[in-house]
Amino acid sequence: MLLDRFLRYVQIDTQSDAHSPTQPSTMKQKDLGKVLAQELLDLGLEDAHLDEHGYVYATLPATPGKEGAPVICFCSHMDTSPDASGKDVKPLVHKNYQGQDLVLPDDPSIVIRMADHAGLDQCIGHTIITASGTTLLGADNKSGVAAIMTAVETMVNNPGIEHGRVRILFTPDEEIGRGVNAVDMDKLAADFGYTIDGEEFGSLQDETFSADGARITITGVSAHPGMAKGHMENSIKIAADIIAALPKDRLSPETTEGKEGFLHPVEMEAKAESARIDFILRDFDTAKLTDLANDLADVIIAVAPNYPNSEIKLSITEQYRNMKEVLDEHPHVMALAETAIRNVGITPKPDSIRGGTDGSRLSFMGLPCPNIFAGEHAFHSKYEWASLEEMEAAAKVVVEICRLGAE
């Protein structure tokens, strides 16, 4: 049931595109949206639909007598990361995994080894799903989508499971930071929610990075290279000097862990006359984003005197904020999920995300929204894998949250 769904979903290319100005950023994300909306209609959720912005909304009505229970939303995103191809995904099913290396046949250099993947040692006997070696799998976040769909089907087919009204939301463009840009909160009309988009089995996350984007724009001095002496100030070289001046032993993803923040160049476009460098700034303490911006400004101050006739500008854009700032005001939301995870026989693992989710912004839009595990691992890469048993457990947690919410 869940496996069949998941295998169908990952074969639909839903890669998002940060360079596209449209909403959604790629129209192919709607291909999965149409499938999901129809499946929800077939399950009897009469209002299920895909809107013009690429969102799937649906309502599972409350069981009789539970109409006054809190309205709970479950959310997963449909898009896959631009970091690796999502086209022509060929999912492979490895039954009864026994700890062996998984050599992916379309590129035998891609080998999933237990020693390299935290959590794989906990999956002995599981059914493991991988891609074939040339694409990502798409478990991020089609694991969550499949878990939510399976939970809905379970509740539809078992009317003895009492629950309040349940709202379903599937989003586009989460991977490029636009996942909830056009969500209709009035239409959603939920009291609180959960994203199903976590990695470690049993994880329950109420904290994300706070995030800003930074852009450095450089306007150099261009001249004919044959007559450039004393005149040219090459923007490519200015950009290179800025990158070279970044801290080497701190403040970068490759040198930080836990609650440590970083500033990270993610894209550069450069010609001799002009250049642009885009950064992401991340820290769990929102106030420290200002410190990171100041660190970047100090780098510019150090480099700029070498190029007196050029212009170097820094701009900062707010992206999202640590959802813990909101969730600490709604402790019952985390408590409900912790109880549900424990009730299905799993030890809850409260944790922080060194990243963000749709729940980060939804929390600040009025929908307190922590994140729950989904059985997805090693995402954004050709090494991505998923555990069927962990996805099934996530579906059980969704059902149990709905049952507890109606008590």
Image (cartoon, rainbow, N blue to C red):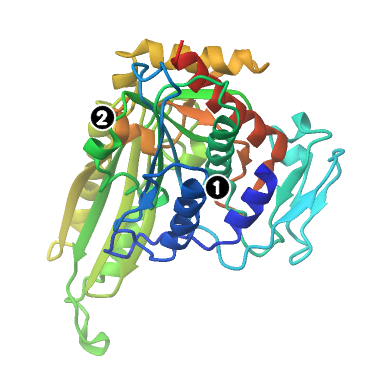
Residue 397 visible? The answer is yes
- Please indicate whether residue 9 sits to the left or right of residue 109 in the image: left
Instruction: Say which amino acid is labelled 1.
Output: Lys
The mark lying in front, picked from 2 and 1, is 1
Residue at (60% x, 28% y) in the render: 158
Residue 324 point in image, percent of width and height: 35, 21
- Please indicate whether residue 346 sits to the left or right of residue 350 in the image: right
Tag shown at residue 142: 1
Mark 2, other Cα within 10 Å: few <14 / some 14–19 / many ≥20: some
- Please indicate whether residue 76 sits to the left or right of residue 303 in the image: right
The foreground one among 386 and 49 is 49
The foreground one among 253 and 320 is 320
Tag shown at residue 364: 2
Residue projecting furthest to the bottom: 226
Residue 285 point in image, percent of width and height: 32, 24
- Asked if marks 2 and 1 touch (Cβ < 8 Å), the reply is no
Which structural element holds mark 2? helix
The vertical placement of 328 against 128, above or below, is above
- Please indicate whether residue 318 sits to the left or right of residue 19 in the image: left
Residue 164 point in image, percent of width and height: 41, 22
| Among numbered discs 2 and 1, the one appearing first in the sequence | 1
The vertical placement of 180 against 167, above or below, is below
Residue 210 visible? The answer is no
Residue at (17% x, 73% y) in the render: 221
Tag shown at residue 89: none
The residues bearing labels 2 and 1 have C-alpha atoms spaced at a distance of: 24 Å
Mark 1, other Cα within 10 Å: few <14 / some 14–19 / many ≥20: many
Which structural element holds mark 1? helix
